[in-house]
Amino acid sequence: MSGPQRGYCLIINNDDFSSSSPKLGNRTGTDIDEESLRLVFSWLGFQVEVVQDATRDQMLSSMEELASRDHSGMDCVACVVLSHGLEGGVYGVDGKSVQLEKLKGYVNGEQCHSLRGKPKLFFIQACQGIEEVKVHAQTDVPSGPGVHPQTDGPSSSGDIRSNVRPAIVSIPITADFLTAMATTPTYVSWRDKYKGTWFIQSLCENLEFSVRRNKDLLSILTDVNNDVSKKSHPNSSKGQMPQPIHTLRMGVFFRVPEELPPTLPTSL
């Protein structure tokens, strides 16, 4: 991350599903996630933009507009989607779904030339199904009257170099993507209406802690996996297992900010 600007961070925060068809519940607590993300990614040097309560078409148009910009002076791009979801996709507030691959396609190497060879980072807070992860033991269990868990589902390589002169570097259009999913396929993810989601809160906390220690992003996400895997639903044995998926060709290290990290809403 040595460019003049870190890049854009687009946050799509879908909360109000009262007009959705089929009917989906409102995502109480997602405002906590949005604020935490805004603070942390701004601290990391991103230009943060938030789209509130987007329909399917508005999610697509937001990604299309983002891809139309000139990212030549940027190190990377980040996109966070906070919504209800299904396997491989997320819902707009109108109840219509869109596949993640379609959202990601707007910024691939073919559609957005100025992002070729640069990290394209996606963080997806949504269920991927309706199954609940069983855990063998309850460690780091959130419990007590302040815990109000809900789910975010519908219910509740290397360069290829030619041998001609001059040398040409060919990079696949799907290279340099990282998609950090809150949960594995077919399973739910958990959200507390007062404290936000397990995944996003752990992501923000671990970014604050580990970027200052020069840790790469995949290692940070491994720590997030470990952190979230130790949590469990109160009064039951249900947990959550995040899943990073990537086609990165090298490590991603954020430049260490000179400022101290911000205080997250859950720490107040």
Image (spheres, rainbow, N blue to C red):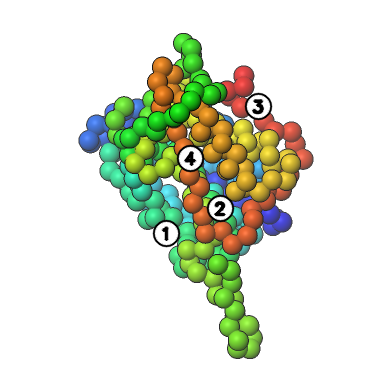
Q: State which tag comes first along the sequence, 2 or 4.
A: 2
Image height of 176 relative to 89, above or below: below
What residue lies at 32% left-to-right and 31% top-to-bottom?
17
Which quadrant would residue 134 be assigned to in this image? Answer: top left
Residue receiving disc 4: 242
In the displayed orientation, state which residue is furthest to the top.
145
- Residue, disc 1: 105
- Residue in the foreground of this view, choosing between 56 and 240: 240
State which quarter of the image contains the N terminus: bottom right
Residue 154, percent from left and from top: 29, 34
Q: Earlier in the sequence, mark 3 or mark 1?
A: 1
Determine the CA span between mark 3 and mark 2: 24 Å
Q: Earlier in the sequence, mark 3 or mark 4?
A: 4
Contact between marks 3 and 1 (CB within 8 A): the answer is: no
User: Mark 4, mark 1: which one is toward the viewer?
Assistant: 4
Against 185, residue 76 (above or below) is below
Q: Amino acid at mark 4?
A: Pro
* 94 relative position to 246: left or right: left
Where does label 3 land, which residue? 263
Q: Residues within 10 Å of mark 2 (few under 14, many from 20)?
A: many
